[in-house]
Image (spheres, grey):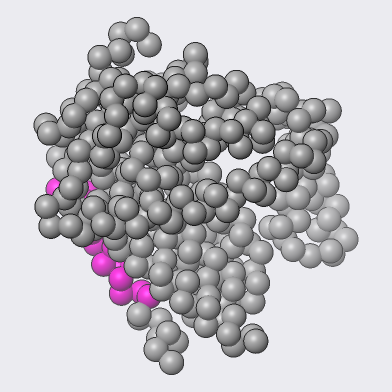
């Protein structure tokens, strides 16, 4: 039973590492800062949560890792929102093939 | 058992860190660099969790929690700086 | 009331962090939680009476699996777009409307939107509009975009935070 839990934790850690890797590939490949922020935030947050939950299972039910999961899930989207907002305010353009930018059109009113 | 080798997890994470560093070096705008630094901070949290399992040092989990919160504060500060505002707005 | 809510939350955090029932540690936790709750209760807690309704916690428990499901879908979606050699993306910023009234609810909605498929919150206005960066724009109109992005979470978040 205990062995099975440890192995399940290690498998979860492996899945998390793969998600991290995908997010960083997105960080390198995608064309502008908003797309990079999307891919990197989503994949790296979920990947790190998988790693922490795998640590919870494989390291003998450490409750601190659950606390770390809560902190990461709350803080990383907020940081992404702050960076996206600041990037748009400092007039960084969207990718030239972008479809629409409602925020640019209506920024004067806000 | 192949999952007992720490390098299986550590090598992809190190590759991730180098991809982030590439974006820090090449990033055409300041915002790209800030994104990469923020992501690097979250990757360090994952590294600390790996240390907890493969070494007998359980205190790395405390470092992971502290690093998550400090990285968040750092990202907020850099975002405010990019926006050109004071830190109390 | 506000101070009591913040005291409970910070003391539970302390218990998870130390994970022991050693008496001096518990006393230090009580002291630190008292200091925190007396200083910061007026800043962080807006609607203290909502905290004591059991129904909200049950809806929160229902919300967590939905959120995890959409989170994993989002990751597979990003993986598909990143590994595809032609990068099938069509980005743009659209505007959506939310009916949540409390600040906590709107922040929870914005964070949920950021972690779910293809969307990233850019701005949150005071009158209930969100500007969302969408990696694959399917609808430019406010109504359509609201239906496709917000409606997944809004009913249940309204029960939790509204």
Residue extent of the magenta highlight: B9-27
The residue positioned 83% from the left and 55% from the top of the image is: C26
Q: Position of residue A13 (x, y in %)?
A: 45, 71
Mostly what secondary structure, the magenta segment?
A: helix
Residue C50: x and y in percent read 76, 30
Position of C116 with respect to C94 (left or right) is right
Locate residue C93, reporting x and y percent.
28, 28
Q: Is residue C157 left or right of residue B2?
A: right
* Residue B36 on the magenta span: no
> Which residue is situated farthest in the right direction here?
C23
Query: Can see residue B67?
Result: no
In this rendering, the answer to whether A19 lies above or below B73 is below
Q: Position of residue A93 (x, y in %)?
A: 18, 28
**Between residues A48 and C56, which one lies in front from this camera angle?**
C56
Q: From the viewer's perspective, is residue C57 above or below residue C72?
A: above
**Residue shown at 42%/45% (left/top)?**
C116
Q: From what the image shows, is residue A104 above or below residue B36? A: above
> Residue, x 49% and y 38% (percent of image)?
C152
């Amino acid at each position: 039973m205990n062995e099975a839990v440890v192995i399940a934790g290690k498998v979860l850690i492996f899945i998390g590492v793969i998600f991290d890797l995908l997010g960083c590939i997105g960080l390198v490949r995608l064309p502008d800062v908003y797309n990079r922020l999307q891919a990197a935030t989503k994949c790296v947050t979920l990947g790190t949560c998988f790693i922490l939950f795998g640590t919870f299972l494989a390291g003998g039910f450490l409750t601190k890792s659950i606390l770390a999961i809560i902190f990461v899930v709350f803080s990383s989207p907020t940081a992404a929102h702050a960076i996206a907002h600041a990037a748009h305010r400092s007039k960084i353009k969207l990718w030239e093939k972008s479809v629409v930018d409602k925020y640019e059109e209506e920024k004067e009113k806000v | 058992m192949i999952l007992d080798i720490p390098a299986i997890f550590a090598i992809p994470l190190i590759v991730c860190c180098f991809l982030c560093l590439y974006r820090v070096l090449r990033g055409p705008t300041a915002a790209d660099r800030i994104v990469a630094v923020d992501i690097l901070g979250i990757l360090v949290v994952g590294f600390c969790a790996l240390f907890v399992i493969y070494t007998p040092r359980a205190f790395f989990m405390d470092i992971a929690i502290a690093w998550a919160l400090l990285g968040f504060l750092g990202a907020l500060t850099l975002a405010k700086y990019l926006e050109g505002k004071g830190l109390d707005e | 009331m506000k101070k009591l809510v913040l005291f409970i939350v910070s003391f539970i955090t302390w218990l998870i962090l130390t994970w022991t029932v050693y008496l001096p540690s518990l006393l230090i936790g009580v002291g630190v939680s008292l200091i925190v709750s007396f200083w910061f209760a007026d800043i962080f807690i807006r609607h203290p009476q909502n905290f004591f309704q059991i129904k909200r916690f049950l809806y929160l428990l229902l919300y967590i699996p939905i959120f995890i499901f959409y989170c994993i879908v989002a990751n597979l979606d990003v993986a598909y777009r990143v590994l595809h050699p032609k990068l099938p993306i069509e980005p743009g910023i659209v505007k959506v409307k939310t009916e949540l009234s409390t600040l906590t609810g709107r922040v929870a909605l914005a964070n949920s939107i950021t972690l779910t498929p293809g969307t990233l919150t850019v701005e949150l206005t005071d009158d209930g509009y969100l500007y969302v960066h969408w990696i694959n724009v399917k609808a430019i109109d406010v109504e359509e975009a609201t239906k496709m992005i917000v409606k997944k979470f809004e009913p249940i978040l309204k029960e939790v935070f509204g």
